[in-house]
Amino acid sequence: MKFVNEQELYTHFEMVYYDMNDIPYESLSLTELDKEFDGYNFFQYGNLFEYIIASFKETQPLSYEYLMQGRFFYAVKKSTHPLPIMGDITELGILVNDRAYFIYYTPYAKNHKKYSNIPLEILSSWLYRSKRWGIMEKTTHNVYKSTLPSTILTPMRSIIAGFEDKKGYALPEYVDFLETKFNQLFRQRYGDKKYFDEEKYFELRCLLDTRPNESWDKSGFQLFVSSHQGNERNVYVVPQADVFKIKKLSNPAEAIDNYAAHLFAKKEGEFDFMQYAEDF
């Protein structure tokens, strides 16, 4: 995994600010849509530690301790093209132990009813005020997956290489396995109206993926939630992108907290989610 430290921030962005009063926000080249979702909006709520991090204390205590020692930043990379071709790139993030992590703003935060499949402990911490967290590897980030919790919730078909055939249908071996495992019909294709019934068909959506930004190989751990599981809010782990080895996390909140602390502490090696895995 490639990390960006504080010094390297200045190689990816032209300007890095640590005080909101220094940010020349009005002079930035941003579309109205960019402005609606820009990380600068966080500053309207005052102290970012209180607004973003305080909610971690009860459900993600290890992460909370590291994040409270962090330093928020707002970075800008100026566009070489005028609007509407391309606007400036901005990033709100936090430096923890000299590693940069990005935090995506959303005006729809705290809409927990929309995410009935994500554990409440994660909704009330990582996703309480934000749309997505992740390790900063470069200026822009993969739109499909995040290395920390995210509400993008990309379907498994877009996360696991070779999951579907050329026509966009999930391969039969995956369908048979998952339907047997979950005792429910699996959504085999997106473009087919037959599978639009969300009460009848389920799918697995990615909460986080520990692989690097552009990696789709058989490595790391992929965490999924089910689109249709009542109020269980289970999290399932797929090791090394091998769907046939899927397990359920016995304590997803604790597992994710320890995984994040592993990153924040700069521990050697990869965090092993399988220590929390159980059959189902």
Image (spheres, rainbow, N blue to C red):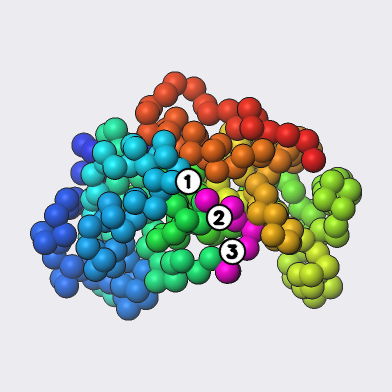
Name the residue type under label 1.
Answer: Thr
User: Which of the marked residues, 3 or 1, is nearer the chain's N terminus?
Assistant: 1
Q: Separation of disc 3 and disc 2 at Cα?
A: 9 Å
Cβ–Cβ below 8 Å for labels 3 and 1? no
- In the picture provided, is 219 more to the left or to the right than 18? right
Residue 214: x, y in percent?
Answer: 51, 43
| Residue 224 is a magenta residue | no
Residue 26: x, y in percent?
Answer: 16, 72
Cβ–Cβ below 8 Å for labels 1 and 2? yes
Secondary structure of residue under mark 3: loop
Report which residue position mark 3 lands on.
115
Q: Is residue 117 above or below residue 32?
A: above
Residue 64: x, y in percent?
Answer: 37, 42
Q: Residue furthest bottom?
A: 32
Report which quarter residue 264 is drawn in: top left
In this view, the residue in front, 59 or 234, is 59
Secondary structure of residue under mark 1: helix
Report which residue position mark 1 lands on.
59
Report which residue position mark 2 lands on.
120
Q: Separation of disc 1 and disc 2 at Cα?
A: 9 Å
Crowd band around label 2 with a 10 angstrom C-alpha radius: few (<14), some (14–19), many (20+): some
Report which quarter residue 272 is drawn in: top right
Tell me the magenta residue range.
113-121
Residue 204 visible in the snapshot: yes
Crowd band around label 3 with a 10 angstrom C-alpha radius: few (<14), some (14–19), many (20+): some
Q: Is residue 222 above or below residue 220?
A: below
Q: Is residue 241 above or below residue 29?
A: above
Q: Is residue 242 above or below residue 148?
A: above
